[in-house]
Every structure is written in structure tokens, then in C-alpha cells.
Image (cartoon, grey):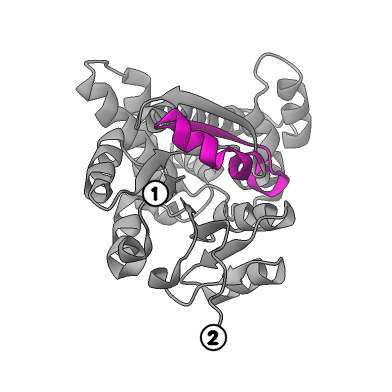
Amino acid sequence: MMTAPRADVAVIGLGAIGLPVAINAAMAGFRVQVWNRNAPRTAAAVHAGAILADSPSDIDAPIVLSVLPDASQLDEVLTAGLETALRHGDVLVVMSTVSPAAMTRLAARLAAAGVHVVDAPVSGGDVGAQQGTLSIMVGGAAEDLERCRSVLESIGSRIEHMGALGTGQMAKACNQVIVGATLAAIGEALTIGRAAGLRTDQLLDVLGAGMAGSRAMEIKREKYLSGDFTPGGSSANQLKDLRIALDAASSLGCPLPLTSVVTGLYERHADSGRADLDHSAIVLTAEEGRLQN
């Protein structure tokens, strides 16, 4: 019996980012293998040309993209068979947002097996993933990045090598500080505007045309107008990322007073039952605060 050829790349996790990543890589001509707990999302990837792996232990590709929400889920998948499936010389690319310290521990764990580790968290949200325009912040050895570059170019419009392992995650922490604060500010601006009787669409138009405009406002515009806060990037992940940023800042002796306040807002937001909503749904918590006063 002939052995099936190895895939060019495997994608683990087919959420809001992982599914379009797998589809775009397949559409670019790569032989893509996928695994995900959720069967319907796996079916969508297979329909686009990806190959289904029945379990993590069946993964067989020299480049493996982990697009899972956090380090604990990656650990579960590694323990469930991915770690033994990885071969000497393979590159595990962690696209999840995790702490730089977690990246160091992961690299040490896989070093004995000769598996290389790269951190490559992304910005651009589900829209950027669908359009193949993600901004990818890479940490790790330059030669490992070069092995992965053509795959990353099929899913992102900017691939930036930030430096050694963990620096990609540090850059993503900086990104999430800005995103979290921006979304919180937009939420408060819309709340006061609506309270004053301003039309949301008109307010977004005029703010977006000036210095207050941002990519976050552009991407989330339809959510503010429709009130449909299906994620995108979840509020729970935004809170996780803000906490990673605060921990990293603390280790560097950098106080982040604004980020501390924004983190508190997202904690209240999550405690109100909105953790699974898109992170732009922080506007709901802002509006709720107005109504309670």
C-alpha cells in the first residue's frame, strides 16, 4: 500500500481565524491538512480542498499552524497526540496569543524531539483572516521563518520578524493594549453620542474621517450598526490578551494605568455574561452603565 504524501502545512483549530487561514492556504495551492473538534467547521475546510486528520496524532506536515485560543488548549492537543506526530525538523507555528514565557516553555518542551517553534500571533480579526490580509508578528529563528514564509504570505499581507522567540507575542500584547483601549473608547463615544440623539451611522462616518478613525472602527462598524456581536474576536480572548500584556509589563517594570482600567472594564463586561460576544460588544457594557445611572 502506498503511503499518502505529507501535507505541506497543517492547521490546528478552525475558529474565526483558523478556518479562513486553512481555506486561504488551500486556495493558494498548498496541500493543507486540518484538525478541529467541531465537525461542521472541518467540513467547510475540506470543501475548500483541505485534507481531514482524524486526530492530532494523524497530523503529518512539516509546518503546523496552531490557531487555538490559548496555551492550555495547545497543551491539550499536544498531549492528545500532536507532540508524538511532530517529526524532527518540523516547525510548530503558534498563531494563538499566549505569553512570551509560555513560548519559552513550549520551545524547551519540544527541543529534545528536534521540533522548531515559532510564535506568529496575528492582527486583523476575522475580516483580515477572510481577506488574507492579516498582520503577522513573528518571533523565532530567521531560518524557521523563511521555511514558513510562503505559507504565511498566503494568509497575511504583512509578515514582520520581530526577533527571537517570544517577541512576536510581545508585539501582539502591544497590539491588544491599543485594540482594547480603542474599542472601549469607541463604545463610550457611541454611548454619549446616542444619549445626545446622534445617529450612529452618521457619527461613525464623521469620526472615521478624522483623527479618531481607526482600523478597529472600520472593521467593527457593521456590528455597531446591526447590534449583532457574534465574534470575530471574543471578549474573553480580549480580556485574556490584556492580562497577558499586564503581566508582561509588570515583568518589565512598566506600569500601564490605562490598560489596567480597560482590563477592569472587560472583566466587568465578561462578568455580565458577555464573554462570548465580540470584543466590540464592550459598547453594551458602556450603555448599560449609562442606563444604571
Is 232 in front, or is 137? Answer: 137
Q: Label 2: which residue?
A: 1
Mark 2 vs mark 1, CA separation in Å: 26 Å
Residue depth check, mark 2 versus mark 1: number of the one nearer the observer: 2
Name the element at disc 2: loop
Q: How many marks?
A: 2
Between residue 55 and residue 133, name the one nearer to us: 55
Task: Identify the residue at image location x=56%, y=62%.
Answer: 7
Q: Is residue 138 magenta?
A: yes
Q: Name, please, the residue furthest toward the front.
A: 1
Coordinates of residue 219 in the picture (x, y in percent) = 67, 38
Q: Residue at x 64, y 44 (%)?
A: 155
Placement of the N terminus among the 4 image quadrants: bottom right
Q: Which residues are magenta?
A: 128-153
Q: Name the residue type under label 1.
A: Gly
Whether tag 2 and tag 1 are in contact, CB under 8 A, the answer is no
Q: Secondary structure at mark 1?
A: loop
Mark 1 burial class by Cα count in 10 Å: few <14, some 14-19, many 20+: some
Q: Which residue is mark 1?
A: 89
Residue 12 can be seen in this image: yes
At which x and y percent is residue 212? 65, 18
Quick check: 178 above or below 228? above
Q: Is residue 105 left or right of residue 63?
A: left
Q: Of callouts 2 and 1, which one flags the residue occurring earlier in the amino acid sequence?
A: 2
Q: Amino acid at mark 2?
A: Met
* Residue 287 visible to the viewer: no
Task: State the residue at coordinates (29%, 57%).
Answer: 75
Q: Locate the C terminus by quadrant.
A: top left
Q: Position of residue 200 (x, y in %)?
A: 72, 35
Residue furthest bottom in the image: 1
Residue 239, compared with residue 10, is above or below; it is: above
